[in-house]
Image (cartoon, helix red, strand yellow):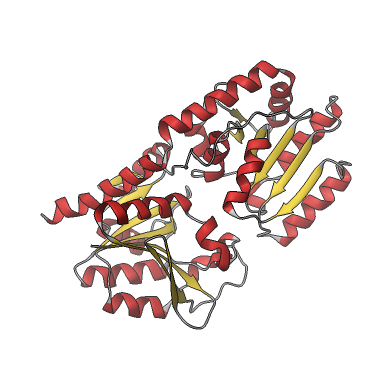
């Protein structure tokens, strides 16, 4: 049986370098596919678009990576990335349709995803729609796309509940596909910081609202934590916002406290998670946030925003992390660092939650159940 997870966009869209993609992007999916390949002897693949002129493939531990030349090249406008398509990919699927294709796309879907879904159905094969984000476009094309999917995959129960309130997803089967972490790699070490060490990991763009992390850091400095540090790790997806952050650092006089470290390999993040006292996640909207679970696995609690989606389902405020409004984000973080016993308690509970609910094995079982449900339907 052939199983594919298709990401119908170029790596640049999510701020990544194509060369490093297999070690950075969609790691829980990759690990789950690797287990599926070994346990069930399935042929598994991860697929993307590429800006190169020719299709190519490579193999990472039993999983084939395929890259198809993109037809519509992305200009950098985040409102237009969903217009990307690939004639090469459509041709391949016309001749070599996998038995099950999981199409990973935003809730707005795309013309390409719809066109591909019609090819898959015409070959009497199955596609599953995997949705990220919390915003959806309700139109005739998307209704048809979701209706004809075998089922839909989302990463949190909260997202499923919100989707079921919408007429767009009426009578649609929605499964939860949790994103797990390898807790033998992402593991705690003893923290010995003399001053608060804050960490931000993610793309640098307006939606992530990294400026709230800078403002929280300033509040710490103003309240006696003069040597508090904030490391910012991740690719620059918005040059305009990056410049604004640099200017804010100067305005707040935090030049000695803030470090922009750029993009890193996935495993390079481990030591930063382990060393940090708190991961900053001030995003406006976050369907899941893989960095959140990775940090928690390392015993580093997360400070997220209320009403941002996924974090509200994963984090229990005051028990294994912090959930705050934009108005009191900095104050909550200040109070956290004033109480050492609270830091120890949240750190321990954060790790325990990941071990209990967000393992790679949980991701694999969800994928296996998803694929097996296709068998049962056909039978």
Residue 106 is left or right of residue 350, and the answer is left
Residue 198 is left or right of residue 363, and the answer is right
> x%, y% of residue 195?
79, 29
Q: Is residue 244 visible?
A: yes
The residue drawn where x is 60% and y is 61% is: 15
The residue drawn where x is 41% and y is 33% is: 357
Q: Is residue 175 visible?
A: no
Q: On screen, 44 above or below 362?
A: below
> x%, y% of residue 299?
58, 31
Mark count: 0
Quadrant holding the C terminus: bottom left
> x%, y% of residue 231?
73, 44
Q: On screen, 333 above or below 93?
A: above
Residue 329 is left or right of residue 259, and the answer is left
The residue drawn where x is 30% and y is 54% is: 38
Question: Viewer-proximal residue, 186 or 350?
Answer: 186
Question: Viewer-proximal residue, 124 or 33?
Answer: 33
Q: Return the residue found at the far bottom.
A: 53
Question: Viewer-proximal residue, 64 or 149?
Answer: 64
> x%, y% of residue 4?
34, 62
Q: On screen, 206 above or below 55?
A: above
Quadrant holding the N terminus: bottom left
Residue 3 is left or right of residue 221, and the answer is left
Q: On screen, 313 above or below 175?
A: above
Question: Viewer-proximal residue, 150 or 276?
Answer: 276
| Residue 197 picture quarter | top right
């Amino acid at each position: 049986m052939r199983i594919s997870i298709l990401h119908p966009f170029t790596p640049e869209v999510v701020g990544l370098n194509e060369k490093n993609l297999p070690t950075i992007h969609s790691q829980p999916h990759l690990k789950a596919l690797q287990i599926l390949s070994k346990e069930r002897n399935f042929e598994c693949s991860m697929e993307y678009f590429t800006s190169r002129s020719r299709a190519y493939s490579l193999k990472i531990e039993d999983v084939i990576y395929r890259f198809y030349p993109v037809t519509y090249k992305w200009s950098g406008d985040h409102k237009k990335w969903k217009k990307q398509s690939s004639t090469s990919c459509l041709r391949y699927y016309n001749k070599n349709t996998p038995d099950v294709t999981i199409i990973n796309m935003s809730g707005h879907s795309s013309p390409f995803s719809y066109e591909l879904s019609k090819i898959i159905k015409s070959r009497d094969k199955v596609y599953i729609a995997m949705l990220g984000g919390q915003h959806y476009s309700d139109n005739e094309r998307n209704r048809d796309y979701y209706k004809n999917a075998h089922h839909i995959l989302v990463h949190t129960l909260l997202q499923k509940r919100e989707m079921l309130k919408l007429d767009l997803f009426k009578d649609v089967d929605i499964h939860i596909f949790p994103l797990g972490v390898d807790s033998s790699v992402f593991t705690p070490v003893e923290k010995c910081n003399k001053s608060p060490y804050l960490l931000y990991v993610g793309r640098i763009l307006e939606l992530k609202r990294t400026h709230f992390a800078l403002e929280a850091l300033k509040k710490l400095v103003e309240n006696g934590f003069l040597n508090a540090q904030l490391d910012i790790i991740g690719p620059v997806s918005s040059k305009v916002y990056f410049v604004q952050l640099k200017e804010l650092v100067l305005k707040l006089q935090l030049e000695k406290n803030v470090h922009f470290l750029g993009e890193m390999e996935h495993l390079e993040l481990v030591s930063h998670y382990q060393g940090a006292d708190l991961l900053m996640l001030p995003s406006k909207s976050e369907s899941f946030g893989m960095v959140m679970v990775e940090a928690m696995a390392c015993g580093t609690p997360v400070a997220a925003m209320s009403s941002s989606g996924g974090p509200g389902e994963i984090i229990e405020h005051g028990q294994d992390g912090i959930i705050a409004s934009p108005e009191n984000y900095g104050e909550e973080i200040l109070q956290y660092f004033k109480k050492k016993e609270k830091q120890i308690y949240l750190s321990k509970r954060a790790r325990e939650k990941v071990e209990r609910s967000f393992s790679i094995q949980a991701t694999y079982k969800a994928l296996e159940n998803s694929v097996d449900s296709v068998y049962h339907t056909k039978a």
